[in-house]
Image (cartoon, coloured by chain):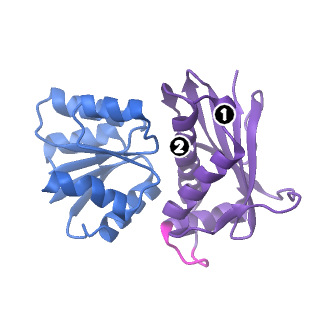
Chain colours: A purple, B blue
Amino acid sequence: MTATLLTSDLVLSVAEEVFAALVDGEEGKLTPWIGAPMPFAEPVVAWVDLAGDWSGRAVLLTERSTADDLARALLCLDPAEDLGDEDLVDAFGEIANVVGGNIKSIVATNGDLGLPHVATTIPDASGTIIEEVLLSWRGRLMIVRVLHLP
Amino acid sequence: MRVLIADDSRVMRQIVIRTLRQAGYDWWDITEAADGAAALGIVRSDPPDLVLSDWNMPEMTGIELLRAINAEGHDVPLGFVTSEGSPEMRALADTEGALFLIAKPFTAESFRDAIEPVLA
């Protein structure tokens, strides 16, 4: 399969499986976002690059407070427990890593998956967005974006 | 059963340990390594009964770790727990002698399905 056959349904399916298995322990907590997206006040972005016979990038974008709760869910922490920046970067980056790895399995047969990166600004957007899926995780906006890089 | 988990993500190592417990392997004695090079050091100094390794790690990848274990003659089996599960990667893992490849996201059931046959 090539990236041209990657569909929003496939991206949604990958994200749903990742969140159900690793984050929530059950299906149904991640659903399509209904309505117009709201701008992020304090965005956090995580991405992994795919290099090989198809070069691209898988990106996760959300609000900082949502990423914090995502990390707490992964670590089985209570909502009120302190969360260090290191844990946030590790957890949110690992979700991007698993989503990206599964997307790579769909779009490419050869090549490498890079290590995850986490930042507060979207990385250089020189690529072309081929799919963007707006999701609601426990009612909060989460964007999964797949880019084709030159 | 002494098991070494190699993954550069501390969060993922915790999730792997949690899932192993859910799968019924709560009796395993777990050691952790943050990359392949650290895992190889533990294999050299205090060989475990099994290594569960991520594929993409800094310093030394999982496949490089497996090749080093084999090249140095350590009798330590290794299974991958990795975010990629393409047929090509499964074939490479098999060629290099990995016991299995568990793709992330995983469940306790997928751990049991991969591990039970090699414990038998």
Q: Secondary structure at mark 1?
A: helix
Q: Position of residue A127 (x, y in %)?
A: 75, 28
Task: Report if residue B59 is visible in the image.
Answer: no
Q: Mark 2 and mark 1, same subunit?
A: yes
Label 2 sits on residue = A102
Observer-nearest of A31 and A76: A31
Question: Residue at coordinates 67% horizontally, 43% vertically from top-left?
Answer: A59
Q: Magenta region: which residues? A: A75-81
Using the numbered discs, state the Cα–Cα distance from disc 2 to disc 1 in whole angstroms. Answer: 15 Å
Say what amino acid the circle numbered 2 marks: Asn
B24 shown above or below A60:
below
Question: Residue at coordinates 14% horizontally, 51% vertically from top-left?
Answer: B49
Classify mark 1: residues with Cα within 10 Å, few (<14), some (14-19) or many (20+). few
Observer-nearest of A101 and A121: A101
Q: Position of residue B92 (x, y in %)?
A: 32, 29
Say what amino acid the circle numbered 1 marks: Leu
The C terminus of chain A sits in image quarter: top right
- Whether the magenta-drawn stretch holds residue B99 is answered as no
Question: Residue at coordinates 66% horizontally, 33% vertically from top-left?
Answer: A5
Task: Report if residue B54 is visible in the image.
Answer: yes
Is residue B63 left or right of A33 when viewed as pictured?
left
